[in-house]
Image: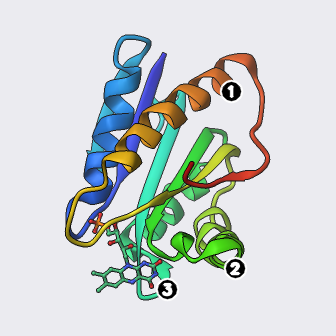
Amino acid sequence: MKICILYDTKRGSTKKVALKIGEALKEKADIKIERVTDKFKVENCDLIIIGAPIYYERPLPSVINFIRSKNGLEGKKVAVFVLCIADKFGEFGKKYTEKRYMRLMTNPIKGKIIAKKVFDGWILNENPKTLEDAKQWALRVLEAFQTGKIIEKVEHPE
Ligand SMILES: Cc1cc2nc3c(=O)[nH]c(=O)nc-3n(C[C@H](O)[C@H](O)[C@H](O)COP(=O)(O)O)c2cc1C
């Protein structure tokens, strides 16, 4: 089984989350972790875990463009994540990240979305809770994939 973890980043936090997800799954699957590029072949991936940070109210365009360029990851099982800071602003922030940020990520996806996750991003100091959250989420995603389940709700930081 091959799991492809794809992301883009400006300041490195999304890469750290992607690496953490990979670390959590490395003994259970064949893992490929890459920054999105046109050259990447999604055909060989059984599960795609794809993530983007939010800048100026939207996911990094490179990630959305990648999804579009790969025909919306049609025919693939996909788990989606975003990093942002808006989730910190209580219930309103959570609703907002679901309605806006997560929707912008999932709209172009034609594959089967099995999990959706919002992580607390950071600007200066790395957030160790986010990295622990990433590890736990990775395990839930793997379980959903293996059991054919779909986690319907958008998951937020714990
Ligand atoms: C210039 C700038 C703009 C940002 N805009 C938003 C935003 O509109 N909404 C939000 O929730 N977070 C915003 N953030 C927070 C980032 O999503 C967060 O810092 C994330 O962890 C950055 O990911 P990266 O390190 O992978 O680039 C912004 C951060 C910066 C530095």
Label 3 C-beta lies within 8 Å of the nearest ligand 1 atom: yes
Compare marks 1 and 2 and give the one earlier in the sequence. 2
> Disc 1 vs disc 2: which is toward the camera?
2
Say few, some or many: other residues with alpha carbon within 10 Å of mark 3 (under 14 / 14 to 19 / 20 or more): few
The residue sitting at the bottom extreme is: 56
41 or 144, which is in the foreground?
A: 144
Task: Give the residue at x 57% y 57%.
Answer: 71
Which residue shows up at 24% across the image and 57% down it?
126
Direction from residue 116 to residue 37 in the image, left or right = left
How many marks overall?
3
Amino acid type at image mark 1: Ala
The residue that mark 3 highlights is 57
Relative to 144, does residue 40 appear above or below in the rendering?
below
Identify residue for label 2: 92
- Answer with left or right where residue 31 lies relative to residue 76: left
Front one among 37 and 85: 85
Instruction: Give me the C-alpha separation between circle 2 and circle 3.
Output: 15 Å
Quadrant of the picture in which ligand 1 is shown:
bottom left
- Camera sees residue 39: no
Q: Earlier in the sequence, mark 3 or mark 1?
A: 3
Secondary element at tag 3: loop
User: Where is residue 53 drawn, in percent x and y?
Assistant: 39, 67
Instruction: Between label 2 and label 3, give the one nearer the viewer.
Output: 2
What numbered label is drawn on residue 144?
1
Task: Give the residue at x 53% y 36%.
Answer: 137
- What amino acid is found at the position of numbered circle 2 in the picture? Phe
Q: Which amino acid does the dot numbered 3 rest on?
A: Glu
Judged left or right of residue 139, residue 7 is: left
